[in-house]
């Protein structure tokens, strides 16, 4: 009996990518049996974040970035990056649901990513925009994972941990807060992007705003004393200048 419908080429590619990431996770778990599921998951996330950043920036062509470049036709390498990342986000979303270890905000981020990639895979243009957006979203991820590995290894009191953490916090604010705002503004004011692309951009921006809020709360909690001393130092300089 014939099936009611056949899987599309896009669906087959996405399924293959999902299985590949799942296989990589299982392989990591077998290779490191003494590590926790979260350790293995974050190792996979580190791989995706690092490669997505490098490849995304390369496809983005930051040196020749222009409005025409951002709206260029989707090329095979753009499509391959979409399929590759779709499989990762599908795997990680499933992992988060199974272990229920992430916040609702992170689940929204993964669901939004899957929807966004699915939308961009159906477009003929804006392939470069996808690459730039992916790089922008993932550029701080390797630092986040390295921070976790350092903390998990008992290195959270070291200088290297502080350097990684501060670098991550600053880069996240710059990437998601400043560059993300600019990119969303350009997308919303462009006639090239369809309505669904603009809607998903707004959703991503809202999710990023949620992450930024959490980061500011974390900085306020952990670095409250340091911030207070810095304010006193600046106030002292201002008062001395006035005298």
Image (cartoon, rainbow, N blue to C red):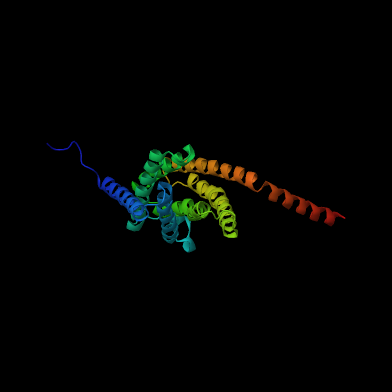
Q: Look at the image and tell me whether residue 71 can be seen.
A: no
Q: Is residue 221 above or below residue 242?
A: above
Instruction: Out of 96 and 213, give the one closest to the viewer.
Output: 96
Q: Residue furthest left?
A: 1
| Quadrant hosting residue 108 | top left
Q: Position of residue 237 (x, y in %)?
A: 79, 56
Quarter of the rendering occupied by the C terminus: bottom right
Residue sitting at 53 percent across and 53 percent down? 154
Q: Residue furthest front?
A: 34
Instruction: Out of 64 and 2, give the one closest to the viewer.
Output: 2
Q: How many marks?
A: 0
Q: Is residue 231 left or right of residue 40?
A: right
Quarter of the rendering occupied by the N terminus: top left
Q: Position of residue 113 (x, y in %)?
A: 41, 44
Q: Is residue 97 left or right of residue 103?
A: left
Q: Residue furthest bottom?
A: 63
Q: Look at the image and tell me whether residue 239 can be seen.
A: yes
Q: Position of residue 64 (x, y in %)?
A: 47, 62
Q: Position of residue 130 (x, y in %)?
A: 42, 51
Q: Is residue 86 left or right of residue 186?
A: left
């Amino acid at each position: 009996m014939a099936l009611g419908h056949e899987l599309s080429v896009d669906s087959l590619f996405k399924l293959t990518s999902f299985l590949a990431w799942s296989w990589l996770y299982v392989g990591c778990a077998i290779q490191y049996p003494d590590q926790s599921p979260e350790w293995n998951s974050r190792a996979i996330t580190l791989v995706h974040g690092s490669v997505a950043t490098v490849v995304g920036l390369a496809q983005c062509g930051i040196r020749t970035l222009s409005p025409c470049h951002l709206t260029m036709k989707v090329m095979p390498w753009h499509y391959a990056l979409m399929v590759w990342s779709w499989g990762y986000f599908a795997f990680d979303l499933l992992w988060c649901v199974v272990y229920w270890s992430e916040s609702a905000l992170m689940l929204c981020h993964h669901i939004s990513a899957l929807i966004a990639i699915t939308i961009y895979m159906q477009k003929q243009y804006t392939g470069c925009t996808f690459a730039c957006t992916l790089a922008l979203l993932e550029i701080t991820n390797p630092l986040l994972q390295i921070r976790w590995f350092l903390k998990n290894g008992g290195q959270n009191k070291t200088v290297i941990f502080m350097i990684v953490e501060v670098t991550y916090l600053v880069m996240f604010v710059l990437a998601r807060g400043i560059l993300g705002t600019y990119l969303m503004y350009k997308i919303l004011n462009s006639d090239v992007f369809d309505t669904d692309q603009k809607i998903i951009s707004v959703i991503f921006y809202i999710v990023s705003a949620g992450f930024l809020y959490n980061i500011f709360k974390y900085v306020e909690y952990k670095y409250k004393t340091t911030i207070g001393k810095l304010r006193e130092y600046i106030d002292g300089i201002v008062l001395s200048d006035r005298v």
